[in-house]
Amino acid sequence: MDSPPEIVLSGIQPTGGFHIGNYLGAVQNWVRLTETPGYRCFFCIVDLHALTQDYQPGDLPGRVVEMTADLLASGLDPERASLFVQSHVPEHAELAWALATVTPFGELGRMTQFKDKSEHQPENINAGLFTYPILMAADILLYKATRVPVGHDQVQHLELTREIARRWNARFGETFPEPQPIHTQAPKILGLDGKQKMSKSLGNTILVSEEPEAIKKKLLSAYTDETRLRKSDFGHPDKCYVCGLHNYFSPADVTARHHEGCATATLGCVDSKRALAESMIAYLAPIRERSLALRAHPERIREILQAGAASARSVAIETMSDVRERLGLYR
Ligand code: ADP
Ligand code: TRP
């Protein structure tokens, strides 16, 4: 007999277009998962989660469109996965409420992301920020997902999801599988300062749909090996941010030339940055073009998201019907 399919679910906040860290660290892996036989994939743009952080309501629809355009442009095929917006499937919020009743209050208080975000927005420590992991658990359990690709910062939330599933199953009968994380050897891409992780909130990013001139400008200001002050100093390509990025964006011969040029002091950091800019612009050009073309047709994006929500919802409705019955709600 065939083994049951693995059900994969992941979520991403609608931050607008995404950066090369998101692309190399997460999205490329999502695309690979959709191509894996036996995997049924759901990818959710988590707009309800986004409401917990400071934002302008007028910006949110555009951020969803840009995020969707970048995902599709990066090769995510909506025929191979359900790509949808969280708020289009109201069962997410409904299940979150039910799961809240089996979530230990104390566990929520231990979440490091809650503490970090509270420090980041001391004027807006809302209850949604506190219950954020319950909504994330609902995203996952609604589809009975078995595998969840996440970055390290989300592992604690996934552990809590498993705990919630266990408590639910113990109280109301076996309903949800305990989802396992998928950790890829995803690289952690640093920001242009070469020190902190590349992150939208730190303003140190290069977007996949960044204009070529902006890529050049940003890379020319990027950090390089601190110990190499002059071109005549020998560099350390394994410690140099620019050399590191060559690994991902430049053809093998260009990468090798610049690594060697750095180590032997025959090529300077500026040469290396110019070459990297050229490679990165060429690498990202097709993604940028596809994304811009899609953004020019928001009706096409809307159609794709509506179809994604319809296919996700057919599963969500079934789960919720079972959940309501198990809860003993009068029907
Ligand atoms: P940001 O920090 O820019 O807000 P998110 O936290 O929304 O990004 O991350 C979305 C996805 O992209 C996550 O799966 C995360 O692990 C991945 N990711 C984010 N930043 C990086 C990075 N600098 N390097 C590798 N992967 C990253
Ligand atoms: N909390 C995740 C983040 O900030 C996004 C997310 C929401 C998610 N729901 C999810 C990730 C479900 C995986 C599965 O990156």
Image: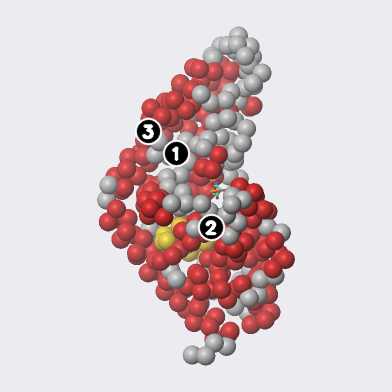
Nearer to us of marks 3 and 2 is 2
Evaluate whether residue 279 shows in this view.
Answer: no
Image-quadrant location for residue 236:
top right
**How busy is the neighbourhood of tag 1: few (under 14 within 10 Å), some, or many (20 plus)?**
many
Which numbered dot is residue 300?
none
Residue tagged by mark 3? 211
Q: Is residue 44 left or right of residue 185?
A: left
Q: Could you tell me the amino acid type at mark 3? A: Glu
Q: Disc 3 versus disc 2: distance between alpha carbons?
A: 30 Å
Element class at badge 1: loop
- Which residue extends farthest front? 123
What amino acid is found at the position of numbered circle 1 in the picture?
Answer: Leu
Q: Earlier in the sequence, mark 2 or mark 1?
A: 2
Residue 205 pos. (x, y %): 50, 37
Q: Quadrant of ligand 2?
A: bottom right
Residue 207's disc number: 1
Residue 79: % across, % down: 37, 60
Mark 2 Cα-neighbour bin, 10 Å: few <14, some 14–19, many ≥20? some
Q: Among all residues in the image, which is located at the extreme bottom?
A: 330
Left or right: residue 173 compared with residue 12: right
Q: Which residue is mark 2?
A: 52
Q: Position of residue 267 (x, y in %)?
A: 54, 14
Cα gap from disc 2 to disc 1, whole angstroms: 24 Å
Q: Earlier in the sequence, mark 3 or mark 2?
A: 2
| Residue in front for this viewpoint, 195 or 175 | 195
The amino acid type of the residue labelled 2 equals Thr
Residue 286 picture location, percent across and down? 35, 39
